[in-house]
Image (cartoon, grey):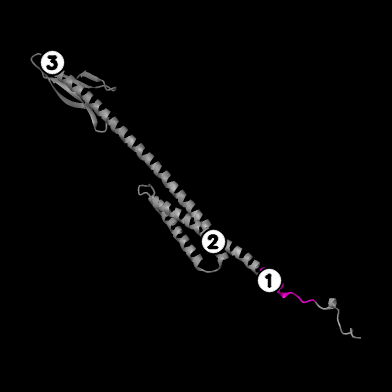
Amino acid sequence: MEGRGLVPASAQPRRLDWSAFVVDARSERRENRSLRAEPQTDLVSEITGLTASIDRAAAATKVTLAECPPASGDDDPRSRLAEYKELSRQLNALRERVALAEGRNEGPMALRAELATLLFFARTLQADADRWRSAGEEREKELQRQRAAARHEQESLVAERVQLALRRDALQSTILRTAARMARENRGECRKTVPVFTLGDGLTVCSVAVSCPRRGFRFAKLWLVTLTRSHDVLVRRE
C-alpha cells in the first residue's frame, strides 16, 4: 500500500539537454554562413579579375591607336582614318558600358555576366586594333618599297641621260672637228644643217655642211658631215 503511488526511477521521463541543441544549431548556422560567404568571396574575386582584364585590353588598344595614327602619305588615307575613328569610338563605348554595368546595382551575378561579355568585346577590339596596326605597317613598308623603286628608276634615268648627253657631245664634237678640218683644207666654210639626229629628249646632233665657193676654174664644192644609222660619222659629197 505504501509503495502504490511511487514510480520507479527507471520509469521517470528523462529531461532533454537543450544546451546541446543550442550549441549544434549555432554550429550549423556558422557553417551555413561560411558556405554562403565562400561563393560570395569567389564572385567578388571574379568581378575584380574581369574588370582588371578589361582595363588591360582597353589600355593596350589605346596604346596601339596612339602609336600608329593614320599615315597622311597613304594612298587611301580616308579608309585608314575611318577605321581609326571607328576603333576609337568602340573603345569609348566599351568604357561607357563598363561604367554603366558597375552603376546599375543589379547584383554581383548580373555584373559578372555583363563584365564577361564586355571582356570578350574588349579582347576582340584589341585584336582588331592589332590587325589595323599590322595592316598599316605592311602598307607603309610597301610604300617605302615603291618610293625606293621610284628613286632607283629616277636615278637610272638621270644616269642614262648623262650618258646620252656625253655621247651627244662627243658625236657633235667629232662632226664639228671633221667639218672644220675640211673647211681649212678647201678654204671653205661650215654651218650646221639638217638632218638632225635625236638621241633623247632635248638631246640632238646636227649635221654640218662644208661649202667651198667657186674660184677661177674650180667648181664650187659642198660636203655634208653627218651620221649614219648606227651613229658613225659620215662625210658625203653633195
Placement of 226 over or under 24, stated as above or below: above
Callout in the foreground (2, 1):
1
- Residue type at mark 3 is Glu
Q: Which residue is drawn at 50% across and 54% down?
A: 123
Provide the secondary structure element on which disc 3 rests. helix
Residue 23 image label: 1
Placement of 203 over or under 15, stated as above or below: above
Residue topped by disc 2: 47
- Residue type at mark 1 is Val
Q: Over which residues does the magenta segment extend?
A: 14-27
Q: Please state the horizontal and vertical placement of residue 135, each as a whole percent of the image.
A: 44, 46
Query: Is 158 left, or right, of 25 in this rendering?
Result: left
Tag 3 near tag 1, CB within 8 Å: no
Q: Residue at x 46, y 56 (%)?
A: 58
Callout in the foreground (2, 3):
2
Residue topped by disc 3: 185
Between 125 and 113, which is closer to the camera in this rendering?
Answer: 113
Residue 88: name its quadrant: bottom left
Mark 2 or 3, nearer chain start: 2
